[in-house]
Amino acid sequence: MTRIHPGATVDPKAELDGDVEVQAGAVIGPHVRIGARTVIGFHAVLDGHLTLGCDNRVSPHAVLGTPPQDIKYRDEPTRLEIGDRNLFREFVTVHRGTPQGRGVTRIGSDVFLMAYSHVAHDNILSDHVVVANGAQIAGHVTLGEHAIVGGASAIHQFVRVGALGFIGGGSVVVMDVPPFCKATGNRARLHGLNTIGLKRRGYSEADLKAIRAAYRIAFQSNLLVQEAAANIERDYAGSCPAIRLLTDFMRTSERGLTR
């Protein structure tokens, strides 16, 4: 049974699935769709063309789906699409897309956005991403699965962080961070592999050995990117299929790779 507090403001056109809870002071706009068993906290704001999946929790004062912070935006009907089982803590802000970009901001499932973090327009956050307190993510950014962004970090627009990438707290990231890698500093530089994250995801010692060797070829040799990627695939992709996540990422980087 859906429970809407008398002090909440829910537009009659909004679509709320079964067993949704809307707490006092929350505001939900006419184009919002909310999946089952989701909780909308005190004074949270959900607006725009927003789809929110099942089992999400939106903490007090979080704001989802409001217009992008883009001076070219003219109230076009762009979107914010959110999956299941996500946690948005206090004062998180997530903006919908822009017509000049993807037209949509997408957040996957099992994502954790900590207090005061900001996700700008046209971003893609894959499943299991964690963004710590106060991190600021500019527009058109992509975060791969299980990526972690440390507190008070800033990520420049159009940057990609690969799967299992780890951004240390207080970093300023202006170039792509490859899969499996740790980056920290202002401007961020690579500091080895996210070994702990790889082990938690079940990578074997043989996998880790291959990924370490690939890291040395990619970032500690004098080879050009395309040449390094080819050498890595030739020597290690057969024994560790995940290697292709790294080499594909290297080949498709447009902003250049953090090193």
Image: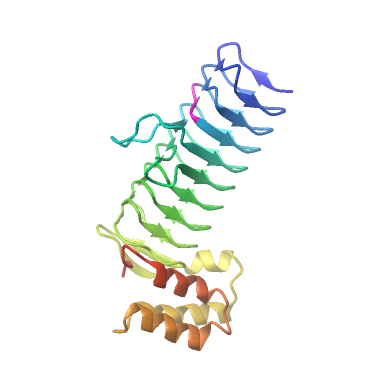
Which residue of the protein is positioned furthest toward the top in this rendering? 6
Q: Is residue 157 left or right of residue 166?
A: left
Is residue 156 or residue 73 the one in the foreground? 73
In the rendered image, residue 154, in percent from the top left (x then y), is placed at 32, 49
Residue at x-position 54% and y-position 40%: 81
Q: Quadrant of the N terminus?
A: top right
Q: Is residue 167 visible?
A: no
Specify the quadrant of the image occupied by residue 21: top right
Which residue of the protein is positioned furthest toward the bottom in this rendering? 235
Q: Is residue 117 left or right of residue 2?
A: left
Q: Which residue range is magenta in the image? A: 43-48
Q: Is residue 49 above or below residue 131?
A: above
Q: Overall secondary structure of the magenta stretch? A: loop
In the rendered image, residue 234, in percent from the top left (x then y), is placed at 49, 87
Specify the quadrant of the image occupied by residue 162: bottom left
Residue at x-position 41% and y-position 77%: 215
